[in-house]
Image: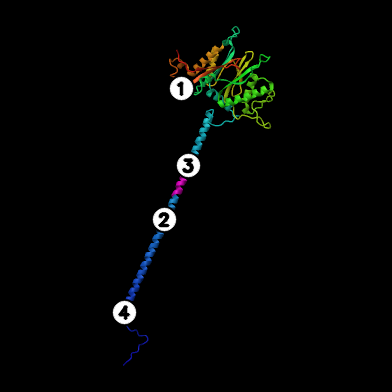
Amino acid sequence: RSYHYRQPNQIHPPSKRSTNMMKQQQQRRRQQQIQLNASHNQSYQNSSKKYNHGLIRLHERRLRLRQQQHLMSSNYLLLTIFFLVFTTFTTTTIMVSASTTSDGGLYHSVRELDKYGNSVQLRNAAECSNRYGSLVIAAIACPSSSSNNDDKEEETGIVICTLRPYRPGIKPKKLIEEECVYTIADNDISHDDDSNTILLAFIGSGLQPDSTLLLNLLRSYARRWWDRYDDIPSLDVMADVTRAVKLGFMSYDTSKEISSLGVGTAIESDDDDEEESKMSRPFGVTSLLFGVQSNGKMKIKSVHPNGVEASWVARAIGRHSMEANALLQRYWYKGMNVQQVKDMCLQIMREVLIGEEEEEEDNVVSSSPMWMKKTDIVCQVLTTRSATEKHVERFPLLVDKP
């Protein structure tokens, strides 16, 4: 038996079996590498897709935010422009209206004056009384001395006529007895002096709450006068008190000019330590004061919102007062009795309110507005017996021609 020894550097060629096994191993390794590479590529592609999708969503979100910011900025700019235009237009309108009109829709201080030097608040108060106040006509009936004074128609008196709406649900007797003037004070006690005042009456045209407040203040002052002097004040004193009350909003101190005669003022404070109470605005009412003396002398005084007082024998206040005063100057004359003055006042009220054109129509009631059909004329006569007797009559405003 022979032995073959291998040389150290001698390489024997592999056998066919080993060659096949090596080829199979290489193929398996190559397939594994291919599969591994494919899996890596797939995972890489998936991760890249997710990353790209996230980038796209982030970009879209940023784009939406930019669009919203742009929209908000544009809306804010539009709102700012609209606000500036509206403010400028409103300011210009108010300034133009305030310069062209008397009111201007603004609040005016009591010390504010217009371009003519007149008080704006006083002008508004007078306008309120003359435009929105009910028409009131008052005239003195003073028959001639040759007439018989025992007759009631020839008695001296003051005739007052005004408008009162018909109120359903009230008994006709109460409607007839309803007075159109308000008594401030009356005195039926006989004194030695024949010239003392026995009756003070009041009527106002304008704002009803202001008229009621003024009446209560005058009654309070007359009550304090009675407690001190056992008499009622004269018409001149009450006219001065009314003027002082209406000018109380100006904070004008009249204590150094007019003596209070120990009675004080009509507007008093609740506390003695505090100053006298003041009004914040003028009274929107024009008032008529009536005084009846025991000797039969009658007086009428008017007090306007600006404190101007005047004496009259016949006067009209309220709405359509200018036309009524012009007719009073034409129709009234000295020597008229009570019935004549009453007929004159009724004629003037119907002529002013209804108008000359409607007076010429055959049927006045059917062609007149509804408020005239439900309105009556209340006529009251103040005489020396008014403290005990009431002379009140009620007439319809519309009367058809026969």
In the displayed structure, 337 sits above or below 252; it is above
Which residue is the site of mark 4? 19
Instruction: Specify the amino acid type for callout 4.
Output: Thr
Q: Nearer the viewer, residue 156 or 361?
A: 156
Which residue is at 42% across, 58% downward? 54
**Marks 2/1: CA distance?**
77 Å
N-terminal label among 4 and 1: 4
Residue at position x 49%, y 21% from top? 375
Q: Earlier in the sequence, mark 2 or mark 4?
A: 4
Contact? badges 1 and 3 (CB < 8 Å): no
Q: What residue span does the magenta drawing correspond to?
A: 67-81
CB contact under 8 Å: marks 4 and 1: no
Q: In this rendering, which labeled residue sits more in front, label 1 or label 3?
A: 1
Q: In the rendered image, which quarter is residue 149 located in?
A: top right
Mark earlier in primary sequence (3, 4): 4
Please say if the residues under marks 2 and 4 sit with CB atoms less than 8 Å apart.
no
Residue 204 position in % (x across, y down): 57, 22
Residue drawn at (48%, 40%), measured in percent from left and top?
A: 82
Q: Which mark is residue 79?
A: 3
Instruction: Name the residue tied to disc 2.
Output: 57
Which residue lies most toward the top here?
146
